[in-house]
Image: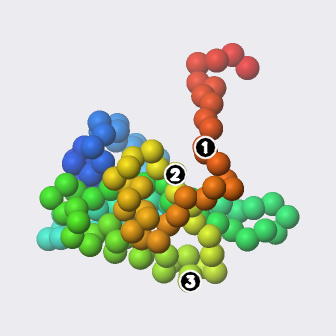
């Protein structure tokens, strides 16, 4: 994870996140609801995918939220992202999970997801967000 965080901008095009404290990294990696894959070559990370398993109430089927994928700029369009998505789908099949969803506001990422078989779900609408940070209860 430290190697991924070190060059985060090359994977995602975003500013680097602060590194996780060792205890936080262990908690993240040991959480069975967090799925994380990485691709590497010669011991160096070239891509990653992170997803979360969501349990539903009333014994409904679990589903997966595909949270983030990043491929090092020099390795894009070479099958790395597709291999990571294939690994996600294989894990879902192994766990008996049939549904996955992803949110994207990035046209390039959206085209990638569509190339992997994802489609816009007109029924689900759009994601709304609200921050409660720095607000009184």
Residue 123 visible here: yes
Check disc 1 and report its element: helix, strand or loop: loop
Residue projecting furthest to the right: 58
Where, quadrant-wise, is the C terminus in this rendering?
A: top right
In this rendering, the answer to whether 104 lies above or below 129 is below
Work out how far the residue at label 2 is from the one at label 3, CA to CA, in angstroms.
Answer: 23 Å
Q: Residue at x 42, y 70 (%)?
A: 116
Q: Is residue 27 left or right of residue 43?
A: right
Residue 130 x, y percent position in the rendering: 62, 30
Question: Label 3: which residue?
Answer: 94
Tell us which disc is closer to us: 2 or 3: 2
Question: Label 1: which residue?
Answer: 127
Which of disc 1 and disc 3 is earlier in sequence? 3
- Which of the 4 image quadrants contains residue 111? bottom left
- Answer few, some or many: residues within 10 Å of disc 2's Cα (few below 14, many 20 plus, some between 14 and 19): some
Question: Label 2: which residue?
Answer: 103
Q: Residue at x 35, y 39 (%)?
A: 17
Q: Is residue 86 left or right of residue 8?
A: right
Check disc 2 and report its element: helix, strand or loop: loop
Residue 1 visible here: no
Q: Residue at x 29, y 36 (%)?
A: 15
- Which of the 4 image quadrants contains residue 94? bottom right
Q: Which colouring convention does the figure follow? A: rainbow
Residue 73 x, y percent position in the rendering: 19, 55
- Answer few, some or many: residues within 10 Å of disc 1's Cα (few below 14, many 20 plus, some between 14 and 19): few
Q: Is residue 83 left or right of residue 103?
A: left
CB under 8 Å between discs 1 and 2:
yes
Which of disc 2 and disc 1 is earlier in sequence? 2
Which of disc 3 and disc 2 is earlier in sequence? 3
- Answer few, some or many: residues within 10 Å of disc 3's Cα (few below 14, many 20 plus, some between 14 and 19): few
User: Foreground: 95 or 27?
Assistant: 95
């Amino acid at each position: 994870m430290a190697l991924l965080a070190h060059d985060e901008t090359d994977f995602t095009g975003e500013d680097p996140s602060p590194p996780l404290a060792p205890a936080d990294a262990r908690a993240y990696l040991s959480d069975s609801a967090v799925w994380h894959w990485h691709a590497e070559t010669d011991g160096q990370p070239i891509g990653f995918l992170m997803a979360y398993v969501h349990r539903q109430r009333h014994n409904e089927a679990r589903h997966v939220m595909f949270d983030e994928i990043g491929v090092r700029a020099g390795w894009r369009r070479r099958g790395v992202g597709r291999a990571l998505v294939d690994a996600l789908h294989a894990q879902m099949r192994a766990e008996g999970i049939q549904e996955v969803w992803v949110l994207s506001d990035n046209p390039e990422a959206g085209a990638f997801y569509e190339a992997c078989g994802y489609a816009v779900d007109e029924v689900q609408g759009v994601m709304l967000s609200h921050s409660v940070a720095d607000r009184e209860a």
